[in-house]
C-alpha cells in the first residue's frame, strides 16, 4: 500500500492534483509551456504518476486555465456585486480586470491560452472566458442601450486592447485605466437612450 500524506485517499489525491496544477502554472509562467516530465520533476513524482491524474499536458493546462478563469471570474463578481448603479458597476468591472492584469495574474491565462487544447477542453475554457463578461453584460443591459450584447463586446474589446498595451510594456495599468474608463464612459454616454 503506497504512503499517503493526508487523512484520506481522496484528500491525498486532491493535494497531489493541487500540487500538479501549481507546478504546471509555475512552469507556464516561467517557460511558456511544459512537458509532463517537467511537471513530474517539479512535484517529485514519476511521469507515470502524473498520468494517473491527467491524460496529457494539454489536459493539465486546461485544468490550470479552468481554475484560473474561475478565480478571475469570482474576483470580477466580487468587485461588482455590491455596486448598484450600472455605470459604476461597469467602472468597477474594468478596474478589477485591469488590476488583475497589473498584478501579473493574466500572464498565466495568456500563456496557457496559446496552447492547443483538446476540443472539449477548449470549449470548456472558452465558456469560462465568456463568463468573465457576465457582470459587464448585466450592467450594460441595465443601461437600456440598443443591442447590449454588442455594446458589452465593444467594451470588452477596449479593455482587451488595454490589456495588450499593458502586457507589451507600452503603458502602465494605472495610466491605461484612467484612459480606458474615460473612453468607455464617453461611448456609453453617447449610446444612452435619448441621445
Image (cartoon, rainbow, N blue to C red):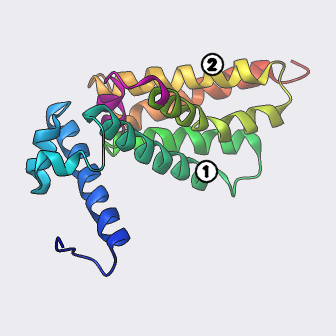
Distance from Cα at disc 1 to Cα at disc 2: 20 Å
State the SS at label 1.
helix
On the rendered structure, is 4 left or right of 177?
Answer: left
Disc nearer the start of the sequence (1/2): 1
Residue drawn 68% across the image and 54% down it: 81
In the rendered image, residue 29 lying in the magenta stretch gets the answer no
State the SS at label 2.
helix
Q: Which residue lies most toward the front here?
A: 1
Query: Which quadrant is home to the C terminus?
Result: top right
**Residue annotated with mark 2:** 154
Comparing 41 with 49, the one in front is 49
- From the top left corner, tell me how far across and down residue 66 is, in percent: 44, 42
**Residue annotated with mark 1:** 77
Comparing 108 with 83, the one in front is 108
Stretch in magenta? 106-120
- From the top left corner, tell me how far across and down residue 99 is, in percent: 43, 44
Q: Residue 58 appears in which quarter of the rendering?
A: top left
Q: Residue 162 appears in which quarter of the rendering?
A: top left
Q: Residues within 10 Å of mark 2 (few under 14, many from 20)?
A: some
Comparing 148 with 70, the one in front is 70
Q: Residues within 10 Å of mark 1 (few under 14, many from 20)?
A: some
Amino acid at each position: 500500500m503506497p504512503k499517503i500524506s493526508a487523512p484520506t485517499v481522496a484528500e491525498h489525491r486532491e493535494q497531489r492534483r493541487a500540487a500538479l496544477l501549481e507546478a504546471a502554472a509555475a512552469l507556464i509562467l516561467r517557460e511558456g509551456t511544459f512537458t509532463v516530465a517537467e511537471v513530474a520533476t517539479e512535484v517529485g513524482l514519476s511521469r507515470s504518476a502524473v498520468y494517473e491524474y491527467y491524460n496529457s499536458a494539454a489536459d493539465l493546462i486546461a485544468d490550470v486555465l479552468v481554475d484560473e478563469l474561475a478565480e478571475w471570474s469570482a474576483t470580477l463578481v466580487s468587485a461588482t456585486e455590491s455596486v448598484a448603479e450600472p455605470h459604476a458597476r461597469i467602472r468597477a468591472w474594468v478596474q478589477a480586470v485591469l488590476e488583475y492584469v497589473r498584478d501579473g495574474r493574466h500572464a498565466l491565462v495568456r500563456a496557457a491560452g496559446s496552447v492547443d487544447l483538446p476540443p472539449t477542453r477548449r470549449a470548456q475554457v472558452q465558456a469560462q472566458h465568456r463568463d468573465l463578461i457576465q457582470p459587464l453584460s448585466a450592467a450594460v443591459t441595465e443601461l437600456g442601450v440598443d443591442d447590449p450584447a454588442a455594446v458589452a463586446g465593444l467594451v470588452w474589446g477596449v479593455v482587451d486592447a488595454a490589456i495588450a498595451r499593458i502586457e507589451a510594456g507600452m503603458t502602465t495599468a494605472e495610466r491605461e485605466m484612467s484612459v480606458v474608463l474615460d473612453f468607455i464612459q464617453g461611448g456609453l454616454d453617447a449610446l444612452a437612450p435619448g441621445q
